[in-house]
């Protein structure tokens, strides 16, 4: 144990926390059974696949959701059900997979997400919105770094909603997770969205009021660094803060409005 392990642990502080991953996988599989889904690859290997959920009728644009799990856990197939709200509102929802730590360093994962976003931009026209949770919130925030995406892709990004993002990676150097993440101070600095220039696109940071204090700080830190709005949603913790994406909710409204 290191001094910040407990601060960054979510599961032990969430009632029934250990049951969430199995419930996510089950809800995700049930949604895939009824959804119109196709997969496209953006690189070699089973993880470089994007699940695409298609709405009936016209398309308002593309929403890319990047899942979390401290860059070392889960796949898009654990979170398919989160596409429902935006799909029913007429958006295409894309969920890219990515190779995980320790095989990948965080900066390589950032590069994979940039590749996935560029691939999606080639395949769809129209506006693109980015949503990510936790480590995925970090990854979507990273897409706004100068030069991360080709200009013709960057110019189509209309809005970004980082949910409970990790925005300053430096504290992770002091967690046992870093045995897997293998961050050093230099990479932690380069990979921290709080150190990026203020982006030119609207960003709305979202976090649950019942989250661990460090996640409230991480969210506030990003909203302050980027001078963008922060919503602290009452009654939500790190695991149920994403549930609003499943149906009409304040979070879904923030994403699709
Ligand atoms: N084992 C981790 C899991 C976790 O934090 C997490 C789980 C699902 C989605 C995002 C997460 N956190 C950051 O990416 C914990 O509870 O501390």
Image (cartoon, helix red, strand yellow):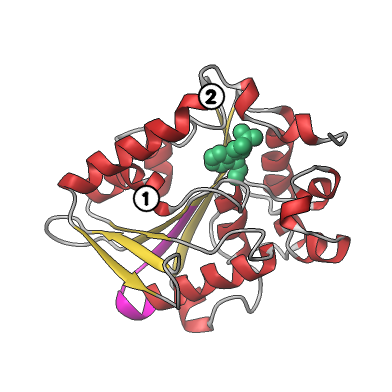
Instruction: Rate crowding at label 2 as few (under 14), some (14 to 19) or many (20 or more) other CA atoms within 10 Å.
Output: some
Which residue appears farthest toward the left when viewing the image? 57
Picture residue at 27% right of the left edge, 56% below the top: 91
Does residue 137 appear left or right of residue 45 in this picture? right
Q: Is residue 45 above or below residue 171?
A: below
The kind of secondary structure element at disc 2 is helix
- The answer to whether residue 138 is seen in the rendering is yes
Whether residue 229 appears in this view of the structure is no
**Is 246 left or right of 4, judged from the image as shown?**
left
Q: Is mark 2 within 8 Å of ligand 1?
A: yes
Q: CA distance from mark 1 to mark 2?
A: 19 Å
The residues colored magenta run 121-131
Secondary element at image label 1: helix
Q: Looking at the rendered structure, which numbered label has been put on residue 77? A: 1
Residue 208 position in % (x across, y down): 57, 29
Label 2 near label 1: C-beta < 8 Å?
no
């Amino acid at each position: 144990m290191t001094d910040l392990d407990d601060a960054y642990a979510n599961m032990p502080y969430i009632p029934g926390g250990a049951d969430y991953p199995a419930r996510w996988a089950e809800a995700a599989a049930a949604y895939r059974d009824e959804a119109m889904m196709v997969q496209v690859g953006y690189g070699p290997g089973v993880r470089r696949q994007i699940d695409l959920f298609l709405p009936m009728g016209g398309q308002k644009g593309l929403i890319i959701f990047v899942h979390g799990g401290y860059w070392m856990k889960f796949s898009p197939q654990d979170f398919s059900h989160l596409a429902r709200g935006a799909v029913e509102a007429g958006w295409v929802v894309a969920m890219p997979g990515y190779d995980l730590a320790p095989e990948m360093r965080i900066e390589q994962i950032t590069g994979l997400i940039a590749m996935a976003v560029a691939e999606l931009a080639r395949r769809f026209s129209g506006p693109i919105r980015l949503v990510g949770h936790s480590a995925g919130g970090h990854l979507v925030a990273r897409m706004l770094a100068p030069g991360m995406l080709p200009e013709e892709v960057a110019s189509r990004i209309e809005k970004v909603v980082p949910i409970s993002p990790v925005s300053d990676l430096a504290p992770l150097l002091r967690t046992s997770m870093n045995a897997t993440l293998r961050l050093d101070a230099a990479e932690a600095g380069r990979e921290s969205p709080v150190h990026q220039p203020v982006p030119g696109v609207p960003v709305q940071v979202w976090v649950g009021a019942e989250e661990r204090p460090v996640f409230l700080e991480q969210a506030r830190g990003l909203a302050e660094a980027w001078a963008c709005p922060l919503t602290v949603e009452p009654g939500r913790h790190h695991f149920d803060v994403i549930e609003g994406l499943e149906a009409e909710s304040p979070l879904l409204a923030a994403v699709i409005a």
